[in-house]
């Protein structure tokens, strides 16, 4: 009898997990290549574009999540996609969670490490530097900026608790792997005003894998091994979050 009940419970629970929809957003694409970096491989200098790295990582995350929930990509090829169009995809597929994947860059030589952002209003000067790059595609001025600020306020008040918990869950997994296996520095979880997160209108995080401006870090991030481990940690963090937040609504006992 207990076995039977357990089987029913597991069935309901797994069905519930599968009912969750996660949208993975590879940053940039097409005309917008994002950050650019170079690293040496033998005598060659290899150029890497952020849009290619983000797509490669996002595809791995999608493949890892697919057996456990509905996982989609905002783009699966190299194409230009506005922040608004990315948000439209979230509406169309009724995404529960939105994960935007990016790679950092800095004019400060030697800047390094990985970080995780969730949407929040703040005025941290260091964070604004990153936002300048990631919000570039959003354009707009005057009234449009005010409308965006109102939207951001609304979205923040509705999603900040979940977004923070999602950031904690993913970053917790990244922290277990990246410093140990790849000697990457943990720059922590930060609030950020990223319009793509506000526009998505759901619990969301934006991940900055490491720094493309740092050739040592870029070389690591370009490797298949790094991307596999990085994607695995993200997927695990998402799954843990889903298990806690999307509990089965049917009570069997
Ligand atoms: Zn980016």
Image (cartoon, rainbow, N blue to C red):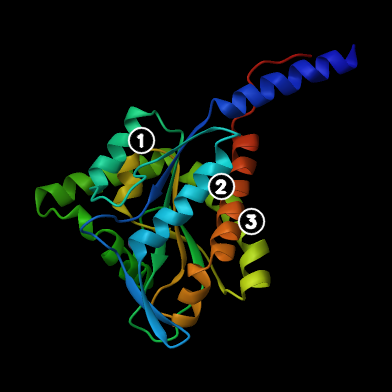
Q: Nearer the viewer, mark 2 or mark 1?
A: 1
Secondary structure category for the residue under label 2:
helix
In-image side of 251 versus 101 (left or right) = right
Q: Is residue 96 above or below residue 50?
A: above
The answer to whether residue 80 is visible is yes
* Residue found at the far right of this picture: 1
What is the residue that sits farthest to the top in this orientation? 1
Mark 3 touches mark 1? (CB < 8 Å): no
Q: Residues within 10 Å of mark 3 (few under 14, many from 20)?
A: some
Q: Secondary structure at mark 3?
A: helix
The residues bearing labels 2 and 1 have C-alpha atoms spaced at a distance of 20 Å
Q: Position of residue 69 (x, y in %)?
A: 56, 32
The quadrant of the rendering that contains the N terminus is top right
Residue 92 figure quarter: top left
Query: Which comes before the other along the chain, label 3 or label 2?
Result: 2
Question: How far apart, in angstroms, are the residues tagged by discs 3 and 2?
Answer: 13 Å
> Which of the two discs, 2 and 1, labels the residue nearer the N terminus?
1
Residue 173 numbered tag = 3
- Residue of label 1: 90
| Residue at figure coordinates x 30%, y 52% from the top left | 78
User: Would you say residue 101 is visible in this rendering?
Assistant: no
The answer to whether 145 appears left or right of 156 in the picture is left
217 over 58 or under it: above or below: below
Tell me where residue 188 appears, x and y as whole percent.
Answer: 54, 66
Foreground pick, 47 / 107: 47
On residue 165, the disc is 2
Report the side of 175 relative to 56 (left or right). right
Query: What's the residue at 37%, 45% (across, down)?
Result: 76
């Amino acid at each position: 009898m207990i076995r039977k009940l357990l089987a029913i419970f597991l069935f309901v629970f797994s069905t519930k997990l599968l009912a969750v929809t996660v949208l993975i957003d590879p940053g940039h694409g097409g005309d917008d290549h994002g950050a650019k970096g170079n690293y040496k491989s033998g005598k060659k200098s290899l150029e890497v574009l952020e849009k290619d790295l983000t797509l490669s990582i996002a595809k791995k995350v999608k493949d890892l999540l697919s057996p456990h929930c509905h996982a989609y990509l905002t783009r699966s090829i190299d194409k230009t996609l506005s922040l608004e169009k990315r948000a439209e995809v979230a509406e169309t597929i009724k995404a529960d969670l939105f994960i935007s994947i990016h790679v950092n860059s800095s004019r400060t030589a030697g800047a390094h490490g990985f970080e995780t952002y969730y949407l929040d209003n703040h005025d941290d000067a260091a964070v604004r530097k990153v936002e300048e790059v990631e919000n570039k595609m959003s354009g707009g001025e005057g009234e449009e900026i005010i409308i965006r600020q109102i939207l951001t306020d609304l979205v923040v008040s509705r999603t900040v608790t979940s977004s923070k918990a999602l950031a904690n869950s993913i970053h917790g997994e990244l922290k277990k792997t990246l410093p140990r296996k790849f000697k990457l520095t943990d720059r922590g979880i930060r609030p950020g005003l990223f319009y793509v997160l506000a526009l998505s209108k759901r619990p969301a995080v934006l991940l900055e894998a490491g720094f493309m401006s740092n050739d040592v870090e870029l070389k690591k991030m370009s490797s298949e091994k790094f991307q596999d481990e990085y994607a695995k940690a993200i997927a695990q963090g998402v799954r843990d979050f889903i298990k806690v937040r999307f509990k089965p609504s049917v009570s069997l006992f």
